[in-house]
Amino acid sequence: MIIQLLAHFILGVSIMSSPLSSPSGIKGWRGIVPLHSTRADVERMLGSGINECKCGYYLKDVNVFFEYSSGNCKTGGSGGWDVQADTVLKIVVHQLPAPLFSDLEIDKTKFEKRYEGHVERIVSYVNDQEGLVIQVDEVSCLVMGFYYVPAAADKDFRCP
């Protein structure tokens, strides 16, 4: 629900019609769901990416970057996840212009506030259940990025 509301707010599109879904019902970013979607799914929607990794997209209202697995646990290229090569591991979305955190129409009580990075003024609002992290600059109150990561329901995909 939170991710659906965010996607609607960020993109002005309904992702309810997306054919992709995770077991927990999360729709990810435009229907692309970490650990459930592949590079082929992304490229069907957005075409081939740019950058050396072919994983970045600079769109009119958003910049989005995908992190892909280079193999499963046995091949050692999984990022700790037992998924095939070219499976989406993480999605990083930067809205243009960056919204104010206070303007997001989400239930902020479902997020845990964490200081995780090297920059003291950047705080992460984390919803592990839904696999969403929102990074906010505490001084400007601007959202620096939306990070779509594996949801808690996907723990069975972890490498042993």
Image: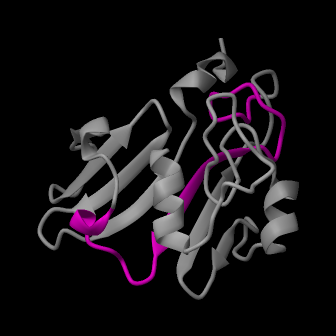
Residue ID at (67%, 46%): 33
Rendering coords of residue 5 (x, y %)? 47, 56
Which one is in front, 16 or 112?
Answer: 16
Considering every residue shown, the one lying at the far bottom of the view is: 60
Instruction: Specify how the rendered protein is coloured.
Output: one colour
Rendering coords of residue 159 (x, y %)? 66, 18
Is 79 situated above or below 53?
A: above
Is 28 situated above or below 112?
A: below
Q: Which residues are drawn in magenta?
A: 76-104
Report if residue 117 is visible in the image: no
Is 54 situated above or below 75?
A: below
- The quarter of the picture where residue 122 lies is bottom left
Tag count in the figure? 0
Rendering coords of residue 80 (x, y %)? 62, 28
Q: Is residue 58 magenta?
A: no
Q: Is residue 92 magenta?
A: yes
Considering every residue shown, the one lying at the far top of the view is: 160
- The quarter of the picture where residue 21 lies is top right
89 left or right of 117 in image = right
15 left or right of 37 in image = left
Is 78 situated above or below 100?
A: above
Residue ID at (53%, 65%): 8
Residue ID at (39%, 84%): 97
Residue ID at (66%, 75%): 57
Magenta: predominant secondary structure element? loop
132 left or right of 87 in image = left
Which one is in front, 62 or 77?
Answer: 62
